[in-house]
Amino acid sequence: MKQTIAILAFFTALLTLAGCNKDKELKHLNVSPVTTLYGPNDQAFVKLQPSTSAAVDFEWEQSRAEDGGVVIYEIAFDTEAGDFSKPIYKMPSNNNGLYNKATLTHKVLNRIAALAGIGSRQTGKLKWTVYASKGINAQKATESRVLELERPAGFEAPVDAYLTGTATEGGDDLSKAVKMKMIANGVFEAFTSLRAGSYQVADRNQGTPAVYHVEGSELKENGATTQDKAGVYRIVIDFNNAAVTLTEIIKFDLYFAPDNKVLGTLAYSGAGKFLGQNIPVVFKQESWGRDERYKFKVTVKNADGSDGMIYFNSSSRDNSRPTNTTPASYYFLTENGDTSQWDYTFKFATEVDGKNIDVTADFSPALEQYTHTIVIK
């Protein structure tokens, strides 16, 4: 019995000693909270220009570690009414947290402003403070400051853009969302059909994407767009300027230049493609030979209700008839603004004369260049 009590006393002493050592170790991890923020000033105003290299420096006094060693800093942001119990954004200070300074670009601040609920083209406020630590036991600064930000019209451009919702070809299954083609930095385009329902623009087709909706000619965060009219549309989304161009495609015609007439109309077949079937082609006899020139003439209705015309042409002003060795680039479709009868036309292959053809105009987003194909029946 005495031996058992002695053993228990021994282990109790060991645990107590270990606890004391642990307390001493933890005390060496203690740091003092930052008590003074240097800049920006409280209620400072910044007009964000995220497309530039502009940045804002956040600075504060140094914290002191109990062991005299290195202190690590994090800067934290919250909504104006927040208490930093759940900061909306945190990041290490410069030099991986070792400096008592953090440099944030306008691009990053624009992202934080969006997290704080400040909309595009809006001005709003958020709070910032600093946490000091040695890896654990982070100490929040005794001071916080308010920063006022004015966001620009545009948004940070995503890597990809998709159309999703009941009005789209993929329905409301995000994994089947219609991918848009990037035609410039921050600008995306889709040739697609819409039906009655609703749709959104998403930055990815899985998980929980950032979403936007169309309101007139503007792109706005969150929400969904109600689509009342079914039709085929050319949709251009410009994230840089929060702008949208929605053009309804009324007719997509194969235009025959020699007779200045339409040979046939291509119907939208889905996934960005227009298909014309069994279109008869007879070249026009001229004194110098048989003329075979063609291009695509598209009748549209603009967002303001006005009628318009788009031509999809060849990139070359004049061409030779294609053969089996003609490169695929010959068939690329170019919208160069030319509306003349003769210039920038394609030429049918010799074998097409007097035959029926199937024509496909392909605006699939995966293509590097929009193109078309001619198949003799």
Image: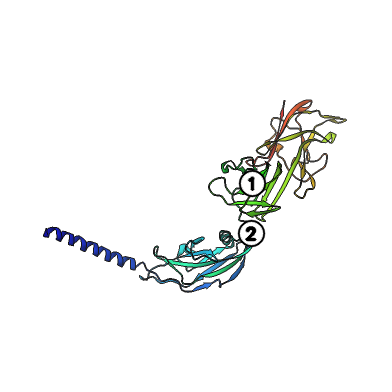
Asked if one can make out residue 74 in the rendered structure from this viewpoint, the answer is yes
* 78 is higher (above) or lower (below) than 310: below
Judge left or right: residue 294 versus residue 195.
right
The disc at residue 161 is none
Query: In the figure, residue 290 lies in which quadrant?
Result: top right
Which image quarter is the N terminus in? Answer: bottom left
Residue type at mark 1 is Tyr
Instruction: Indicate the position of residue 128 as horizontal and vertical percent values.
Output: 52, 67
* Colour theme: rainbow
Query: In the figure, residue 230 lies in which quadrant?
Result: top right
Task: Determine crowd level at label 1: few under 14, some 14-19, many 20+ residues with C-alpha closer than 10 A.
Answer: many
Task: Determine crowd level at label 2: few under 14, some 14-19, many 20+ residues with C-alpha closer than 10 A.
Answer: many
The disc at residue 199 is 1
Question: Which residue is disc 2 drawn over?
Answer: 120
Question: Count of labels shown?
Answer: 2
Query: In the figure, residue 366 lies in which quadrant?
Result: top right
- 275 or 338, which lies in front? 275
Instruction: Indicate the position of residue 309 as horizontal and vertical percent values.
Output: 79, 44
Instruction: Indicate the position of residue 267 as horizontal and vertical percent values.
Output: 72, 35
The kind of secondary structure element at disc 1 is strand
Instruction: Indicate the position of residue 40 as horizontal and vertical percent values.
Output: 55, 71
Residue type at mark 2 is Ser
The kind of secondary structure element at disc 2 is loop
Measured in 3D between alpha carbons, the distance from the residue under mark 1 to the one under mark 2, in whole angstroms, is 20 Å
User: Pointer 1 and pointer 2: residues touching (CB < 8 Å)?
Assistant: no
- Image point (40%, 67%), residue name: 70
